[in-house]
Image (cartoon, helix red, strand yellow):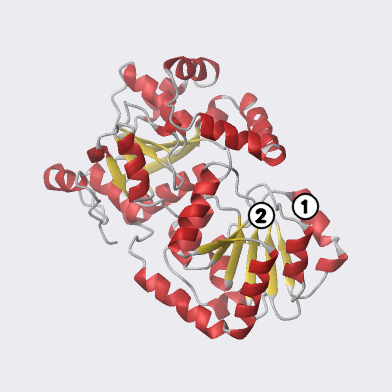
Amino acid sequence: MRKKRVLLFSEGFGTGHTGAAYALAEGIRLLNPDVQCRVIELGRFLNPTVAPWILSAYRKTVSSQPKLVGMMYKTQYHKSLNRLTRAALHRIFYTHAQKVIEQLKPDLIICSHPIPAAVISRLKQQGLDVPLYTLITDYDAHGSWVNPEADRYLVSTSRVKSILTGRGVPPELVTVTGIPVHPKFWERSSKQQLRKEMGLADIPTVLIMGGGWGLMFGKDVMDSLTARMDDIQLVFCMGSNDKLVAKMRSTPLLNHPNVKILGYSSEINKLMDASDLLITKPGGMTCTEGQAKGIPMLFYSAIPGQEEKNAQYFVELGLAEVLDSDVVDRWFSLLLREYAGLEEQRKRRLALERQQPHNCASTVLQLLGKSADGAAEPRTARAQQARTEEPVYVTP
């Protein structure tokens, strides 16, 4: 019997969209190895010459003119991509998308970025007969995510569901799954063991993530961070910004045994487990990974638009604060005075967490008619359950 095939399309605008696609694919594979998954950044795949240029231009705009990005987000907030835009995207960048789908023959397409979702929607309008699920990777829903051809939306929270239904999406087509995180974030490991394994001191530790493109905060915050290096370990993880990594490593102030400066790391899950506090930009994926690990978060330099909404959501939950030098001083004092108490709070927060990190993968398997152990399930009862207000989860 032919295995079920899931094709996940993303785009490389930031790291979260593709990260969510890979996380969902790995979760599905872990829960049911009989389901085949493939992740493709569609624009880069179809246009390997043009796509990197566009992504580079986007990166520079986000870094140099964040207010412009925020203004564009807000002015287009309630608008879907229109037919003309869809047609232009297809003609310029995605002409061969139909051929990719015909060759791979998926049973389900999941898009974790609005542009491929719009492209696949256009193909469905022209006769493509493959279910399309849209995976929204933030704690807000811009109008560009909405397409009438989408068969289902997988969303982070009930609030995002309300936003979509307010735009006319039928509520039975929106399933609250949470944002998927890689199975490496599903469990927590021993802090002391990981510190020993990774060459870290067994003292209060702060993980400072620069996002996929590097770090952006000022001298006052950096002075607050480095003021207590003798007592608090700082682990800087700067993503793919190699120039910044080299600059930081050559900075005399950071030449301290309790300061570690890393570039890209595939072990963020371990670094979060080994740390007591996370300082990060509020990208949807990083926030969700931090929530899965129960680590308190401080947010800096939110990009106006979706990152501001992400920050607002986690601050309102009491899981994060917005960074400034006073907040750093207060948290560092807490780490030194109430270290054991903060760790107990983290454990209690994890124990009370309702939304399990495997929910999204479990829900997709349900909707495919597959269980978490590889056995096929009848579509009738399961499909009916999946159309309720909240999803019915399968525990792995």
Q: Which mark is residue 374?
A: none
Tell me, yes or no, if residue 234 can be seen here: yes
- Give the labeled residue for mark 1: 244
Residue 293 in picture, x, y percent from top left: 47, 66
The quadrant where residue 387 appears: top left
Element carrying mark 1 = helix
Tell me, yes or no, if residue 184 can be seen here: no
Mark 1 packing: few (<14 Cα in 10 Å), some, or many (20+)? some
Quarter occupied by the N terminus = top left
Residue at figure coordinates x 37%, y 20% from the top left: 123
* Type of amino acid under label 1: Leu
- How far apart are labels 1 and 2 at the CA level? 10 Å
Nearest the eye: 256 or 364: 256
Residue 296 in picture, x, y percent from top left: 53, 68
The quadrant where residue 142 appears: top left
Element carrying mark 2 = loop
- Give the labeled residue for mark 2: 210
Residue at figure coordinates x 63%, y 61% from the top left: 323
Q: Earlier in the sequence, mark 1 or mark 2?
A: 2
Residue 57 in picture, x, y percent from top left: 68, 31
* Type of amino acid under label 2: Gly
Mark 2 packing: few (<14 Cα in 10 Å), some, or many (20+)? many
Nearest the eye: 358 or 298: 298
